Image (cartoon, rainbow, N blue to C red):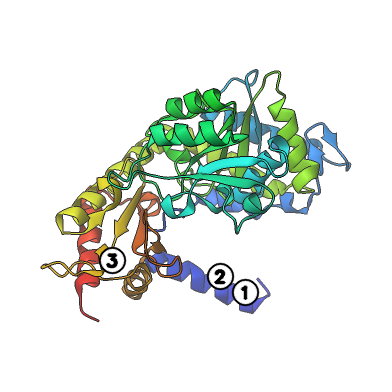
Amino acid sequence: MKDTAIKKLIAAETARQKKVTNLIASENYVSKDVLEALGSALTNKYAEGYPGKRYYGGNVIIDKVESLAMDRALKLFSLSPEKWHVNVQPLSGSPANIAVYLGLVPQGGKIMGMSLDHGGHLTHGHRVSGSGKFWLQVPFGVDKTTELLDYANLKEIAMREKPAIIVAGFTAYPRVIDFKKFRDIADACGAYLMVDMSHFAGLVAGRAYPTPFEYADIVTTTVHKTLRGPRSAMIFARIDARELDKKIDRAVFPGMQGGPHENQIAAVAVALREASTPAFRSYATQVKKNATALANELSKLGWRVISGGTDSHLVLIDTWMEGKKTATGRGAVTGKEASDRLEKAGIIVNKNAIPYDARPPADPSGIRIGSAAETTRGKKEKDFVAIAQKIDKILTRQS
């Protein structure tokens, strides 16, 4: 590379990634094949439109690339092309979610989504997101005692508010979602059911987490988390008389974006092929085992694990514990302080709100930990027990 400044920065970031323990729940490490596709000549081609329906010439090969990605996406999740359609053009998860609302929810209509401070995502209707500026969020959360989804309360809210769409998904909820209960609630109030499986898509692909496709109308996902692909997204829609597939395609293009990033789509296709292998199934299973091992060890050491454990790759820890230090010295560490201390020691996590958090978002009461990236590096349960013990030592050390 002739640009020495960028070359040095890339080298520095590569070195940083290699030397840290990466516990960011939304990060992973892609293969060399994925990187090769991202850096390919496909980046040179403009391809507004969809396969067979482009507005530019010279897209014969590009159409094959995109069609292959679509075909692999459907096959990975065992979906019939007669019953499901997938759009692989969204640039990332947030635009994918916004595209669904744009296609299916009238402006000012209601989006029922998990509250941000209970584990939901900004694009599930939060007021600072575009999803909360053009549509109205109807929030739901978890039970204060169990810290689990309260489906009875969720149904009460849905029947009272009559949202146009209900979003099942999370960024900081560690437990399995009961998609059938969400389906029943959506049917009862006349809403679409959308599942945002961005965090657990790789676990679904690896048969380590229940599939949402039996119950959902629409499924969105990023590709770069547990699915271990490039930074990108996909939207799956049922094919039926409601024409959800056509409405969402129109919302993505021309509604949301112009020419798709076909190098990125090619990298998605590579990642989907990798995720279809027996090795990836073993990986997904190990991701869950590792998260459980870490959660159990931190709990044994005296830290409060939100909801008492995890069913996924994600663990949410209360480091503040109401601002009180226990007899063993655990607690009274804010999420920001915990994140900063751990990063200085080479462990990367992110500060995160916990349900019913009394502290501000900029310095909340907890941290979010994920097992996907370090599992990619080959770590097993014993390694995550050791990581938990190291976290404990760092957070109980007096500054």
**Residue type marked 2:** Ile
Residue wearing tag 3:
320
Can you give x and y, in whole percent of width and height, for residue 49 in the image? 81, 39
Q: Quadrant of residue 342?
A: bottom left
Image mark for residue 10: 2
Q: Residue at x 22, y 67 (%)?
A: 331
Q: Residue at x 67, y 75 (%)?
A: 3
**Residue type marked 1:** Ile
Establish if 256 lies above or below 285. below
Q: Residue at x 40, y 53 (%)?
A: 373
CB under 8 Å between callouts 1 and 2?
A: yes
Which numbered mark, 1 or 3, is in the foreground of this view?
3
Residue 173 seen in the figure: yes
Residue 383 seen in the figure: no
Residue wearing tag 1:
6
**Residue type marked 3:** Trp
Can you give x and y, in whole percent of width and height, for residue 148 in the image? 34, 41
Q: Quadrant of the N terminus?
A: bottom right
Q: Is residue 251 left or right of residue 209?
A: right
Q: Earlier in the sequence, mark 3 or mark 2?
A: 2
